[in-house]
Image (tube, rainbow, N blue to C red):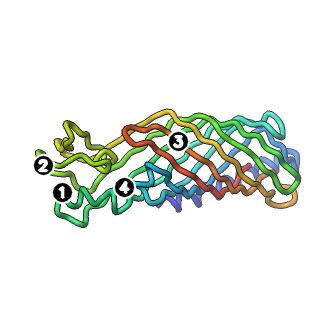
């Protein structure tokens, strides 16, 4: 379902600048406002990679261009987290059920500074700044209350607590969440779309880190999108 929403947002993002351009100066490649919509594909880094195989979602942003090179931008990114078999193995073993599944999400709200070196057709930019990261995870089935299980990092990932070396299994519903201040930084390439339109396609690589709960969130995010 997320990809349908993303396609609709992409159409809106393309239509919006066309409407603005029709009312203003044609061919303006230096608008004061900037917006974007992207499709991120994330590669988890350790320790996140022990629990997540890959992540994908969408991102949006809006900000202000001080001039052709400098901009301040507010960004939102969502990634669905796809679990590894290794992090599900202890839960499946404890339940004696190989069909137990799990999933997660990470939401990032960033305030970023962008430095751009832009030609008429091609450009390069560097971007980064602080943000708030919020991660949620859940399992399809909980472990029965009172089950004695030795503590393992996988249990912490799924929202369980550990005490005296044992996993605390007194939760009737497994749903864990953790939030923290984090940071991101990276860069990208842009290419102008059309001979006059003030919007560009972009390809970006960025590192995201946040000390969320017992297990930090670390992602290397590759994004393809369109920017006004």
Task: Give coordinates of residue 107: x percent, y percent.
Answer: 48, 44
Left or right of 226 on screen, residue 219: left
Residue farthest toward the front in the current orientation of the protein: 165
Task: Give coordinates of residue 37: x percent, y percent.
Answer: 63, 52
Which image quadrant is residue 183 in? top right
Left or right of 78 on screen, residue 173: left
- Distance from disc 1 to disc 3, alpha carbons, whole Å, reads 31 Å
Task: Give coordinates of residue 33: x percent, y percent.
Answer: 75, 39
Q: In front: mark 4 or mark 3? A: 3
- Distance from disc 4 to disc 1, alpha carbons, whole Å, reads 18 Å
Q: Residues within 10 Å of mark 1 (few under 14, many from 20)?
A: some
- Distance from disc 2 to disc 3, alpha carbons, whole Å, reads 34 Å
- Distance from disc 2 to disc 4, alpha carbons, whole Å, reads 22 Å
Give 196 or 86, whichever is nearer the viewer: 86
The reply to whether callout 1 and callout 2 are in contact (CB within 8 Å) is yes
User: Which residue lies under the disc numbered 4?
Assistant: 103
User: Which residue lies under the disc numbered 3?
Assistant: 209
Q: Residue at position x 63%, y 37% from top?
A: 74
Task: Give coordinates of residue 166: x percent, y percent.
Answer: 19, 43
Q: In terms of sequence position, does the residue under pointer 1 or pointer 3 come before the other? A: 1
Q: In front: mark 2 or mark 4? A: 2
Disc on res. 147: 2
Disc on res. 94: 1
């Amino acid at each position: 379902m997320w990809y349908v929403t993303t396609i609709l947002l992409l159409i809106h993002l393309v239509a919006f600048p066309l409407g603005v351009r029709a009312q203003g100066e044609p061919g303006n490649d230096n608008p004061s406002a900037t917006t974007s919509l992207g499709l991120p594909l994330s590669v988890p880094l350790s320790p996140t990679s022990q629990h997540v195989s890959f992540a994908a979602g969408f991102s949006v942003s809006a900000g202000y261009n001080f001039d052709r090179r400098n901009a301040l931008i507010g960004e939102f990114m969502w990634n669905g987290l796809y679990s590894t078999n290794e992090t599900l193995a202890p839960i499946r073993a404890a339940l004696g059920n190989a069909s137990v599944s799990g999933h997660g999400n990470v939401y990032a709200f960033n305030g970023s500074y962008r430095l751009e070196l832009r030609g008429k057709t091609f450009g390069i930019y560097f971007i980064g700044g602080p943000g708030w990261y919020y991660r949620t995870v859940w399992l399809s089935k909980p472990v029965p209350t009172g089950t004695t299980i030795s503590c393992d990092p996988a249990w912490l990932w799924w929202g369980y607590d550990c005490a005296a070396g044992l996993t605390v299994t007194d939760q009737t519903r497994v749903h864990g969440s953790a939030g923290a201040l984090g940071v991101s930084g990276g860069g990208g390439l842009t290419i102008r779309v059309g001979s006059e339109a003030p919007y560009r396609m972009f390809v970006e690589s960025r590192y995201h880190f946040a000390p969320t709960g017992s297990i930090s969130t670390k992602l290397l995010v590759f994004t393809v999108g369109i920017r006004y």
